Image (cartoon, rainbow, N blue to C red):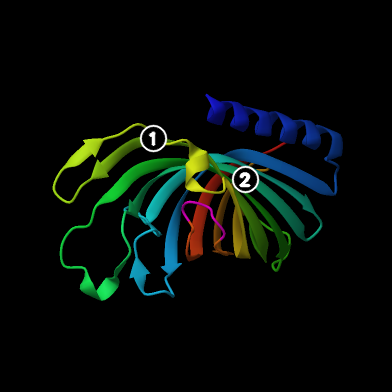
């Protein structure tokens, strides 16, 4: 229930902001978005175990996208939800010696991500618009689900962990992004936004190693 409530609250706040701020020289757009995330890890220690690894490095997300344009500048905010598979080995073993399956916990993580972007338009005002800019994103761990223990031979169900047992619930990353927007009508637009971010390690359960995230979202936006 938390996720639909957060998305609804986000929509209400952004619509209220738009009705107060939109003018003839500015525009506000909002709409649904879907996308994918791809994770890449840097393991400098040369070990696995007590370190997190994805069983699904490509993850789908969905949510709401809102953007506010002033002249050539575009400020965007998204609220994205994803559920991703997460594995954690139970022992520290050098990578080169892994010859048999290792005991591990498997669980799903429910995460909400809020990327904020600021872009500058490179093309003239037209149906097609191209922006480049910077992005900052905050990931928040809502809960865990579907936990199992693999003992090397069998998979056993276990009680879901409290998210506080997995480390920090909040992690922030930064990077670069580009925005491609095509105006279908004076009211509706399609927007494709690829981004690359770097998340420093720091106790967040899905990022105990240095992590690069590649994200691409596709939005259908309505001008208010």
81 w.r.t. 120: above or below: above
Which residue in the protein does label 1 denote? 145
Is residue 187 visible to the viewer in this orientation of the structure? no
Q: Crowdedness of circle 2 by 10 Å Cα count: few (<14), some, many (20+)?
A: many
Q: Mark 1 or mark 2: name the one nearer the start of the chain.
A: 2
Of 131 and 141, nearer the camera is 141
Give the x, y percent position of residue 222: 64, 38
Give the x, y percent position of residue 62: 49, 41
Q: Quadrant of residue 140?
A: top right
Quadrant into which the C terminus falls? top right
Q: Is residue 43 left or right of residue 14?
A: left
Task: For mark 2, give the secondary structure.
Answer: strand
Of 142 and 134, nearer the camera is 142
Is residue 94 visible to the viewer in this orientation of the structure? yes
Q: Which mark is residue 206?
A: none
Task: For mark 1, give the secondary structure.
Answer: strand
Give the overall secondary structure of the magenta segment.
loop
Give the x, y percent position of residue 178: 61, 64
Q: Quadrant of residue 54?
A: bottom left
Q: Crowdedness of circle 1 by 10 Å Cα count: few (<14), some, many (20+)?
A: some
**Residue located at (63% from left, 43% from top):** 185
87 w.r.t. 111: above or below: below
44 w.r.t. 189: above or below: below
Q: Are marks 1 and 2 in contact (CB under 8 Å)?
A: no
Give the x, y percent position of residue 126: 69, 58
**Residue located at (62% from left, 45% from top):** 78
What's the CA distance linking mark 1 and mark 2?
24 Å
Q: Is residue 203 highlighted in magenta? A: yes
Q: Is residue 194 left or right of residue 48?
A: right
Which residue in the protein does label 2 denote? 78
Q: In the image, which residues are magenta?
A: 202-206
């Amino acid at each position: 229930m938390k996720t639909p409530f957060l998305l609804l609250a986000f929509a209400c706040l952004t619509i209220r902001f738009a009705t107060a701020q939109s003018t003839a020289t500015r525009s506000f757009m909002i709409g649904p978005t879907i996308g994918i995330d791809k994770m890449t890890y840097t393991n400098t220690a040369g070990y696995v175990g007590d370190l997190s690894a994805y069983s699904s490095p490509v993850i789908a997300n969905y949510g709401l996208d809102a953007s506010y344009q002033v002249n050539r500048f575009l400020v965007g905010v998204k609220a994205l939800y994803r559920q991703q598979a997460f594995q954690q080995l139970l022992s520290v073993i050098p990578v080169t010696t892994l010859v048999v399956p290792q005991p591990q916990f498997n669980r799903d993580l429910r995460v909400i991500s809020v990327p904020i972007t600021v872009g500058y338009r490179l093309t003239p005002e037209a149906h097609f618009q191209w922006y480049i800019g910077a992005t900052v994103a905050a990931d928040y761990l809502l809960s865990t689900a579907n936990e199992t223990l693999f003992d090397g031979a069998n998979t056993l169900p276990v009680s879901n962990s409290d998210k506080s047992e997995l480390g920090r619930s909040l992690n922030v990353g930064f990077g670069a992004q580009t925005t491609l927007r095509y105006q279908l009508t004076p009211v509706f637009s399609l927007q494709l936004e690829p981004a690359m971010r770097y998340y420093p390690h720091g106790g967040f359960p899905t990022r105990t190693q240095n992590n690069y995230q590649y994200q691409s979202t596709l939005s259908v936006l309505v001008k208010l």
